[in-house]
Amino acid sequence: MEQPTTPTGPDVVLRASRLRKDFGDTRAVDDVSITIHAGERVGIVGPNGAGKTTTLLMLLGAIEPDHGTIDIAGHRLPGGRSDAMTRVGFAAGYLPLPSGLTVTETLELFGRLYGVADPTTRAAEVLDELHIGRLAGQKVESLSSGQGTLVGFAKAVIHHPRLIVLDEPTASLDPDVAMRVRDRLEHMNSERNATLLLTSHDMREVAELTTRVIFLRQGTIIADGPPDQVVASHGHADLESMFLAEAARVREQEV
């Protein structure tokens, strides 16, 4: 049975409080709290092992925290995950697409699962928005990695989600195609007030797409704010130099 909806305020899309997750003797996430409001564009960044993916998977309800609470659009996880996920779109290059279906059939399938009123029309629309209508009749198993990433992105936004969550959204894309995806995200944010939450190792992309950065180090938040303020507060010129410095710190600790 779903837990009762949780008051989070009219413009709070996601609220996570004091998240902790251990894997054996390793603490991957330690006392992380995040509140994201409607229309924000937020990046979660940090070097390998910082806890980004674990945090993201907890926020999506894919894994449960050992401690802490998560609310999405007023629905408390894990009990309210089904209702919460109807308001969320998630895309990552490593997520497989169902084999044996064409691109259009795949998008229609997910459109129906998300309750889209006319999934056939919406599938054609989202392919056109991404300029990949030529892929409509192609089997998903024949797609290149970049084409698969684009179709995965189309699947994530077919239902006009309130919250779009992206893990390395343009990692396998050519620069011109990556720019097309970033432009589409900015359009959805400005025209539909969609909230963006992403992780990426491309700090230039993060700086371009986000208005707020949450920087993780060994499972804890070391900075949270506008990108320019975050880097200035830690004595760096830009996000890339801060990321490289943190990555070097991790390597030194591993030696």
Image (cartoon, rainbow, N blue to C red):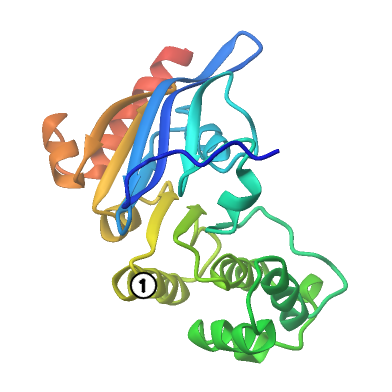
Residue at image position (29%, 71%) is 190
Residue at image position (58%, 71%) is 150
Residue that label 1 marks: 192
Quadrant (top left/top right/bottom left/bottom right) for the N terminus: top right
Residue 168 pos. (x, y %): 50, 53
Residue 62 pos. (x, y %): 65, 39
Q: Is residue 234 left or right of residue 15?
A: left
* Front-most of residues 60 and 235: 60
Residue 31 pos. (x, y %): 41, 19
Q: Is residue 127 left or right of residue 199?
A: right
When asked about the image quadrant of residue 121, the answer is bottom right
* Front-most of residues 58 and 179: 58
Say above or below: 194 vs 166.
Answer: below
Say above or below: 82 vs 161.
Answer: above
Say above or below: 73 vs 117.
Answer: above
Count of number-bearing discs: 1
Q: Is residue 168 left or right of residue 148?
A: left
* Front-most of residues 63 and 246: 63
Q: Residues within 10 Å of mark 1 (few under 14, many from 20)?
A: few
When asked about the image quadrant of residue 192, the answer is bottom left
Q: Residue furthest front?
A: 4
- Can residue 247 be seen in the rendering of this structure? no
* Front-most of residues 4 and 25: 4
When asked about the image quadrant of residue 114, the answer is bottom right
Residue at image position (61%, 42%) is 80
- Can residue 79 be seen in the rendering of this structure? yes
Residue 162 pos. (x, y %): 44, 61
Residue at image position (47%, 75%) is 177
Q: Amino acid at mark 1?
A: Arg
Q: Secondary structure at mark 1?
A: helix
